[in-house]
Amino acid sequence: MTEALNTSLTTKILGFLEKPGVINGLGFRLWRFSYVLRQRLIPSWRRAKLVDEEFDRKYGLETGDWINLGRLNIASENLEHGTHYEAVSSALFGEAIAQISEPLDDFIFIDFGSGKGRALLLATECAFKKVTGVEFSSDLHQVALQNIETYKRRTGSSKMIESICMDATSYEIPADKGVYYFFNPFDEIILERVINNIETSLRANPRTVYILYCNPIHIAVVEKTGFSKIAEGDKFALFKATAAGQASGRKL
């Protein structure tokens, strides 16, 4: 109960701080400063930060930072439902993706709220046949394109990897087997709409898909659909729908 209350409070505070305004902007900078301080003082956070910095240095990328949406160019009616930019840590992504036990070479990977593309590049190092990011900020999208180009040039990778600048609710879900990834990119209103789009796609094309939700603040949105939760950790939850188009609790 205490953890749920803390999560709810954190969500409300960040939701307030991410709105435009001088007071909100100052508050967000203080919140961000506290996060940076924890990265310096907490050993596990410090180690994770060093790994992420080394990933960027190794390939000549720029995927880090915390950015308030008020500082970005975003042409979407759903701006108010978005959250700040923050890249997933390599450690968390690796822990979460490892929970999928079957081979990934027959799956596509789609990151909703892909930002500068760190998760896309981490996914590229897995066996996915294609990696796609969906990002509604043109600023972040442009950085992602540069990161993708740099990564492919440095590694010689021929993997199909793309960043698409559009609102997540408008993205047409491909009919492939897929891993749909979320790093708390938006609130429960938009999350529910995107999950509904996935359900609609599954009804039309029954197949195996996963929903990988990191920093799952609005996990109840996914749980109420009836998708089977097959794994979870401190900062992620993994759900699955089977090839028969059946999620536990209701038909898709």
Image: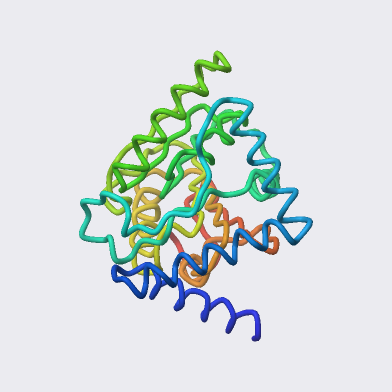
- Residue 171 in the image: state x and y as whole percent: 30, 45
Residue 64 as seen in the image, left or right of residue 48: left
Quadrant of res 214: bottom right
| Image position of 101 with respect to 226: above or below | above
Which residue corresponds to the image point at 22% horizontal and 55% vertical from the top-left?
Answer: 76
Q: How is the image coloured?
A: rainbow
| Image position of 154 with respect to 28: above or below | above
Quadrant of res 172: top left
Residue furthest right in the image: 43
How many numbered callouts? 0
Residue 80 as seen in the image, left or right of residue 160: left
Camera-nearest residue between 74 and 244: 74
Which residue corresponds to the image point at 52% horizontal and 52% vertical from the top-left?
Answer: 211
Which residue corresponds to the image point at 69% horizontal and 64% vertical from the top-left?
Answer: 234
Instruction: Say which quadrant the N terminus sits in.
Output: bottom right
| Image position of 63 with respect to 45: above or below | above
Instruction: Say which quadrant the C terminus sits in.
Output: bottom left
- Residue 159 in the image: state x and y as whole percent: 51, 21
- Residue 119 in the image: state x and y as whole percent: 54, 41
Which residue corresponds to the image point at 35% horizontal and 44% vertical from the top-left?
Answer: 173
- Residue 190 in the image: state x and y as whole percent: 34, 63
